[in-house]
Image: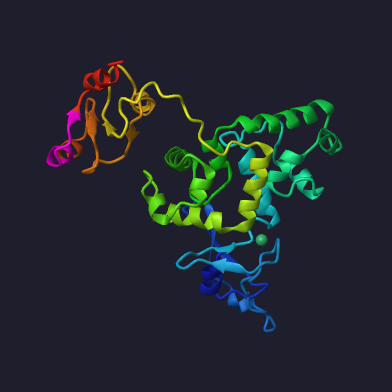
Amino acid sequence: MHNADQIEKLDLYLGDEVFVEKGGEIIPKIVGVNTDSRQSTAQKVVFIEHCPECGSQLHRREGEAQHYCLNDLVCPPQVKGRMEHFISRKAMNIDGLGAETIDLLYKKGLATSIADLYDLTFDQVVNLDRMADKSANNLILGIKNSKQIPFERVLFALGIRFVGETVAKKLANALKNIDAIANATYDELIAVDEIGEKIAIAVQQFFQNPRALQTIDRLKAAGIQFEVEEVALDSNELEGKTFVVSGVFSKFSRDEIKELIEKNGGKNVGSISAKTSYVLAGENMGPAKLEKASSLGIPIISEDDFLAMISTN
Ligand SMILES: [Zn+2]
């Protein structure tokens, strides 16, 4: 009944008796209405127009069944959900902080955005219900330690729509810092490996929101990592060269090979194009890729060829 189309289709009135079936033998599903039992004074069910939590106008995206509250940086359950995502293990991994504590902090007005977490003091935290000295210390320490979390996970923690762990990593590695991502054009975004139209639009929308920018400014001031830590290069041997790595290798894993490319000044790209310098082929590389590389005249090299390229110094 969260779906306006279903309500309309069933032509529901308040107080109706309905027939329920087990959909797929498990999930209860309303299949019809007992109109005989309906009171003549009954009112038609009208789908709500405003968010029951924050009162803002609900929005339905073209072609989607669900309604959304777009007030996502203010609406209480959305703010709390955003904070829960921010502190989660794969994001900022803040020890000693869970959904219950977030709820308390929110209700007391101590943390109404992720940036507020970095202003919390021991005294504020220890005064919360059921918070012992030790837990309060853990929480403050957990928040402090999260300042060491690398940029790619910070980017994931921000909760940008469609930006999961993998996409966050790709964006961070390609554009290096938050300002470059925030100011990236649509074309720059879709040029990043695995970033398509849907993600590019979501990223741009996120950074158009003044509240999001304000939160980021406060997180910057708190000392959160907003740029990729530059790894010292082993050499510049591969500078200006792009590689497509494919297949299975015997001396290194594919990720290690990619790391070696970057550590020697080269760049990894996801797909073969006329601009690719080399295709680094391991065992079991797909025939389509091989064919594409040959048709474009791109040199195909082996793991040993590659290691020879970077071992000159
Ligand atoms: Zn709302």
Vertical order, 70 against 84 (above or below): below
The tally of labels here is 0
Image quadrant where residue 287 sits: top left
Is 62 placed left or right of 296 in the picture? right
Is 33 placed left or right of 278 in the picture? right
Vertical order, 179 against 261 (above or below): below
Viewer-nearest residue: 14 or 231: 231
Image quadrant where residue 271 sits: top left
Residue 127 lies, in percent from the top left, at 87, 37
Residue 78 lies, in percent from the top left, at 65, 53
Residue 15 lies, in percent from the top left, at 68, 72
Residue located 77% across and 39% down the image: 120
Residue 269 lies, in percent from the top left, at 32, 38
Q: Which residues are magenta?
A: 292-300
Q: Is residue 298 magenta?
A: yes
Residue 304 showing in the rendered view: yes
- Which of the colour schemes (rainbow, by chain, secondary structure, one colour) is used? rainbow
Residue located 49% across and 47% down the image: 181
